[in-house]
Amino acid sequence: MQNFSLSFCGGVGMVTGANFLLSGAGKKILIDCGLIQGCKFCEDRNREPFPYDPKSINALFITHAHIDHIGRIPLLVREGFTGVIYSTPATRELSEIMLIDSLGVLQKEAQQDGLPPLFERTDVEKALTLWRTLPYHEPTSILDIFSVNFKDAGHILGSAIIEITYVEEGREGGTIVFTGDLGNSPSPLLRDTELVENADYVVMESVYGDRVHEGINERTEKLAHIIKETVARKGVLMIPAFSIERTQIMLYELNNLMETGIIPNIPVFLDSPLAIAVTDIYRHRVKLFNEGVREDIAKGGDIFDFPCLRLTNTTEESKAINHVPPPKIIIAGAGMSHGGRIQHHERRYLPYKENTLLLVGYQAAGSLGRILQDGASEIYLQGERVPVRAHIFSLSGYSAHRDREGLIDFASHFPESIKKVFVTMGEPKSELFLVQRLRDYLDLPATAPQQDDVVSITL
């Protein structure tokens, strides 16, 4: 048995900024190093010093490629980290384009605030040279004292539940598991989230720890109904979508709805160079899809393409969308409307009641998406006051996160001998609600740590 300390350096009391430190036996490893996001793409807190010396970190493990889990990796490297970064191959591939894409937004925000950029492209490039990939289900010896195994989290392409087991003199000791974000299984695209049945400690997410999503059939029916109502009004349907997973699910659903004649064939614009690049990666990672989708692909055709879909990579192509008469559908980033091309469309179309804004992902507190979701009658966008007369809808069923019931079901498979469940990566209300449910329903030793808490564990 070996004593370790577990430090909660980010991702507690909030959804974003995941960052956990495991220290002991002369080693220090990080799990995730994400950007804190809210009303801005990059909150000021990201500029605060890390609560540890980056030079002292031996390895960094990445659960998945969302910016709130990878966004500060280049800063970690800039400040002296030279260890190895581990993830699945798909996470490595997605992380490269996500980090490069985020540079433009970070530089723009820094310029507006009169600050130097958080990091430079050279920091991203150096981080990528430190990266190594591990496949699912192949336990690997790391730093001579850990056996690390990746399981499929079912959240986005390449997402992993990370099992870390302490090994002493060839014998396995205790295991700590970091779930990252857990998928909303069954997913339209991905395989189901795998279970954790052997662990002494679990650090798990709670984004929707106090809420329940629509069912599979209900979410599709609601999507079709919203589209048909917008078409009847001859309006524009705007969907702010995260570039990874949510966009691909929307394309897949729209393809199916049009093929089956449930909704009419109208122009659909994917107005996001990042989402277009991510979709190309999805096309080449077919083995990570669920069996039903693989069967669809085997029958021929591209599940992410259909006759009404138009990809707009350039600024000129994006502006040309304005000249296409409604009804039409526009899918654009960013998912929480805190930047990207979606803001241009929102400024143009939110003032008119025939149009619709559909929110299909989590909206962080303080973000423009959350403000719209909460019923604002006007917003300030790109320096202008914009009245909100368009219809605003939310469909949580398309979230890539498990809901309350899914999280409880996931935790129900933990072993009876588990020593502690740390509920993280949720807003305080969500974390505390889930903690109480895990205690009351499953008799689990659950707790919600606070920012900068350090706890002792034994592996």
Image: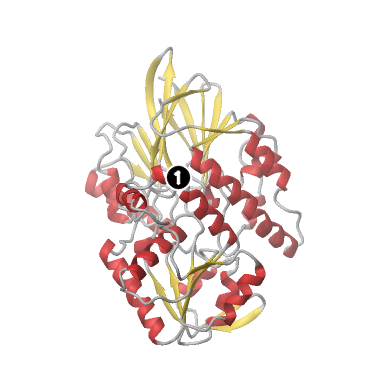
Q: Residue at x 34, y 46 (%)?
A: 191
Residue 292 visible in the current orientation: yes
User: Dot 1 lies on which element?
Assistant: loop
The one nearer the camera, 327 or 71, is 327
The one nearer the camera, 401 or 356, is 356
- Of the 4 image quadrants, the one containing the N terminus is top left
Q: Is residue 138 left or right of residue 186?
A: right
Q: Position of residue 61 (x, y in %)?
A: 51, 36
The residue pinned by badge 1 equals 285
Which residue is farthest front? 300
Q: Quadrant of residue 49?
A: top right
Q: Residue at x 62, y 57 (%)?
A: 42
Mark 1: few, some, or many residues within 10 Å (few <14, many ≥20)? some
Q: Quadrant of residue 300?
A: bottom left
Q: Is residue 298 left or right of residue 20?
A: left
Which residue is farthest top? 169
Q: Is residue 253 above or below residue 20?
A: below
Three-letter residue code for mark 1: Arg
Q: Position of residue 349 (x, y in %)?
A: 54, 82
Number of on-image labels: 1
Q: Quadrant of residue 248?
A: bottom left
Q: Position of residue 31 (x, y in %)?
A: 51, 38
Q: Is residue 431 above or below residue 161?
A: below
Q: Position of residue 233 (x, y in %)?
A: 41, 87
Residue 453 visible in the current orientation: no
- Of the 4 image quadrants, the one containing the C terminus is top left
